[in-house]
Image (tube, rainbow, N blue to C red):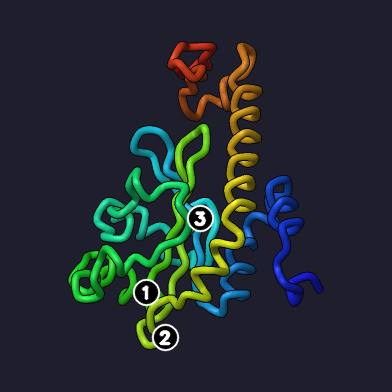
Amino acid sequence: MYMTLPLSHHDIYDAALDDTLFDILPQRLAREMNVPSAIFFWLHPGNMQEISAGTQPEANADYIEILDQDPWMAEVKDERANSGAFRLTDHVSAEAFEKSVMYNEITLKHRLDRFWCLGMIQDTRDGRVVTAFHKGKQAGDFSDSELGFVNRHTRDLGRLHSIRRELIRNNIREIAAADRTLQGEMPIFDLDHEGRLLRMNGMA
């Protein structure tokens, strides 16, 4: 029943602690904006990037392969962090996007409703999160009212992502304790904020 109600800050905070609610949050945001696509990207320290939740997941595996060729993601820059939502067409023209690998190998191949993009960049203690909304080619660029909708939720979304990163950080510390090795799957180095090594697992 809550899916038909306007999204509140309580819904966003509940999603910080509940994986199921977090997974469907982009869908709820997209539905309330009446757009086909919304995605959360984690940009971890270093070069690791991942789609943490979003609509149209059938394209995720292919998209991750060409993420560094996405002209939209190339606009994730320091000066745009923590300053609210912005239209990507302010920085990437529709003509340039149509010539990109992103458009020809992902959007067209998977028949995605992603042509116009509205983005927001937020910092956490463990890297950045990018929230992206997309509309199909025939729908036209994002309006001022749609920009305003995202900006009204900026603070709540920022807190949501910060809380989730802290939960993940604490979980990794627990997994990487001396008697655990994360099932031997990957090396874990736990550093403090000055880059000093606190602990590492067996694989490390």
Question: In screen coordinates, is 94 left or right of 179?
Answer: left
* Residue at the image position 64 percent from the left and 13 percent from the top: 179
Q: Quickly name the residue at label 2.
A: 139
Residue depth check, mark 3 versus mark 1: number of the one nearer the observer:
1
* Amino acid at pointer 1: Trp
Q: Position of residue 198 (x, y in %)?
A: 53, 11
Q: Secondary structure at mark 1?
A: strand
> Between residues 124 and 189, which one lies in front from this camera angle?
124
Which quadrant: the N terminus? bottom right
Task: Report the residue that reaches farthest toward the right.
Answer: 1
Task: Report the residue that reaches farthest toward the bottom.
Answer: 138
Q: How many marks?
A: 3
Q: Quickly name the residue at label 1.
A: 116
Q: Note whether 196 is above or below 126 in the view shown.
A: above
* Residue at the image position 36 percent from the left and 33 percent from the top: 46
Q: Position of residue 149 (x, y in %)?
A: 57, 69
Question: In screen coordinates, is 86 left or right of 56?
Answer: left
> Between residues 140 and 53, which one lies in front from this camera angle?
140
* Amino acid at pointer 2: Ala
Which quadrant: the C terminus? top left
- Residue 66 position by quadrant: bottom left
- Residue 178 position by quadrant: top right
Say if mark 2 contacts mark 1, CB within 8 Å. Answer: yes
Q: Quickly name the residue at label 3.
A: 40
- Distance between the alpha carbons at the discs numbered 3 and 1: 16 Å
Say if mark 3 contacts mark 1, CB within 8 Å. Answer: no
Q: Note whether 68 is above or below 140 in the view shown.
A: above
Circle 2 Cα neighbour tier, 10 Å, few/some/many (<14 / 14–19 / ≥20):
few
Q: Earlier in the sequence, mark 2 or mark 3?
A: 3
